[in-house]
Image: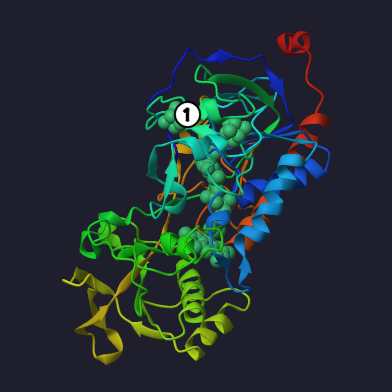
Amino acid sequence: MSIRPKVLYGEPEELPEERYDVLVIGGGIAGMQASLDLGNMGYKILLVDKEPTIGGHMFKLSKTFPTMDCASCISTPRMAEVSHHPNVKLMTYSEVKEVWKDGEGNFRIRVFEKPRYVDPSTCTGCQECEFACPVIVSNEYDWGLSGRKAAFIPFDTAVPRIAMIDMDNCVFCGQCERACPADSIDFLQRPKWHTIRVKTVILATGFHLFPIEKKLEYGFGKYANVITSMQMERILAPTTSWHAIVRPGDGKEPSNIAYVLCAGSRDRTLGNPYCSQVCCMYSIKQAQLIAGALPLADVTIYYMDIRAYGKRYEEFFQQAKDMGIRFIKGRVAKIEDMDNGDLMVYYEDIENGGRLSKAQHDLVVLSIGLLSNPEIAGIFKNAELKLDMMGWIASPDENVNPVRTSIPGIFAAGTAIGPKDIPDSVVEGSAAAMEAAAYIEKVRAVKPVPAEARSEG
Ligand SMILES: Cc1cc2nc3c(=O)[nH]c(=O)nc-3n(C[C@H](O)[C@H](O)[C@H](O)COP(=O)(O)OP(=O)(O)OC[C@H]3O[C@@H](n4cnc5c(N)ncnc54)[C@H](O)[C@@H]3O)c2cc1C
Ligand code: SF4
Ligand code: SF4
């Protein structure tokens, strides 16, 4: 999910250089944690996110395992704290394009800020432009399950809560401009280039969702009632507009739901041999939420192994069984749709001799894996950011310092390093903040050698 305008009007504006102590790239839970820790220590932070709002994947989730806390209720106050922190400057809808290490121990950064076509200094977030806009397109924040306008605020709890205009779909009717009470619509807004100087950088660029349409046998994108687990997060979340568990094909309330685990993970045919670590647990979480919301519905989880590896995770798994959720050990081979929109799931029934079996369900949820975000390595112009063989950021010291990278002064945190859950992402955000602070103090303590002394020596 990403809003990437195809059209950018106007020559970019070049802004004067700004200085901070730390650049944090990525405003998910790991990047927010790192920014808050460093801001509280008194360092000046620039937090850049390519999306129009910070929050990453977490604020779009329903609840979090195993405590079942509301994800939005935990992440929204943190997003607000970041945006109001006196030592943290937020730059959203902006992409870090280049990073150089200079000879003075600083990093010089070029950031490209895309135009929102709305003046952020005057927009009050009242949504009048959105109400007036006649264009409705698919809403990427609900993974296509709902619609949004061409003039829109990405999310109710977006931070910053500023409207924007999607130029790819705008028909230039001018209704938003007439409706805006703050006169904030600016069709002539230009992109901006920011030049930044910092002492250290934290990469918290997170993960991509596995593009499960690649697994043709599962029919995602072809069968309306085969959905992803991220779509199910939105269906179950209290922050959606429809407040009902219905299947997308015909709006029917499902009564026999299947989960297919390891969809896009531990699958060499897709070039993805590793375990995504969170899919077992989030599927068990979703199954429990469905059991609570639809007590008469059957929920079946097809799995290879259940990896309930964390504190209170095994108990959470046992609790799901006690609630009547069925667990069938077996890899799903293929899914076929039926005339009434139901799905036939073919699977290898391992506990019954490994024979091929089939079962009918009225909704199938694919528990998709986490994919690395290797594009970040391309921004380094005079140093090499090493990635592991699957594209996650590699540490030269993985066992004792996982947040260190191959470039001194550049640290990483969260799912940018590898698949993990929210608590571990938060811990790494704090660890990267501590490493960054220690690095700044070490660089400050080393007195620069004067140029004359260098040439004499
Ligand atoms: C369906 C699903 C359900 C889940 N449920 C749970 C759960 O219940 N409990 C749990 O503990 N975990 C759960 N997880 C895992 C959880 O989502 C992750 O652990 C967490 O979101 C990782 O946070 P992060 O900050 O590392 O990355 P992200 O949330 O991916 O944030 C990365 C941020 O970086 C930004 N970014 C990326 N590239 C750039 C760039 N080049 N420039 C600027 N910005 C950039 C992105 O826009 C994003 O805001 C679930 C995951 C999935 C897929
Ligand atoms: S000008 Fe574009 S964004 Fe504004 S109301 Fe018309 S279609 Fe919507
Ligand atoms: S109407 Fe104007 S002030 Fe209100 S959200 Fe839209 S752009 Fe912002």
Which coloring applies here?
rainbow
Q: Nearer the viewer, residue 113 or 447?
A: 113
In this view of the protein, can residue 150 be seen by the observer? yes
Question: Could you tell me which residue is drawn at 66 percent across and 60 percent down?
Answer: 73
Label 1 environment density (alpha carbons within 10 Å; few <14, some 14–19, many ≥20): some
The percent coordinates of residue 232 (x first, y second) are 43, 64
The percent coordinates of residue 58 (x first, y second) are 57, 56
Q: Nearer the viewer, residue 170 or 265?
A: 170
Question: Could you tell me which residue is drawn at 54 percent across and 86 percent down?
Answer: 319
Q: Secondary structure at mark 1?
A: helix
**Location of residue 436 by image quarter:** top right
**Location of residue 171 by image quarter:** top left
The percent coordinates of residue 372 (x first, y second) are 44, 49
In this view of the protein, can residue 385 be seen by the observer? no
Q: How many marks?
A: 1
Question: Could you tell me which residue is drawn at 55 percent across and 47 percent down?
Answer: 155
| On screen, residue 272 above or below 352 | above
Question: Could you tell me which residue is drawn at 24 percent across and 90 percent down?
Answer: 353
Point out the image quarter for the C terminus: top right
Question: On the rendered structure, is 248 left or right of 140?
Answer: left
| On screen, residue 324 above or below 417 | below
The percent coordinates of residue 224 (x first, y second) are 27, 61
Question: On the rendered structure, is 363 left or right of 408?
Answer: left
Q: Nearer the viewer, residue 30 or 385?
A: 30
Amino acid type of the residue tagged 1 in the rendering: Gln
Q: Which residue is mark 1?
A: 175
Q: Nearer the viewer, residue 237 or 278?
A: 237
Q: Is mark 1 within 8 Å of ligand 2?
A: yes
| On screen, residue 35 above or below 177 | below
Question: On the rendered structure, is 456 left or right of 202?
Answer: right
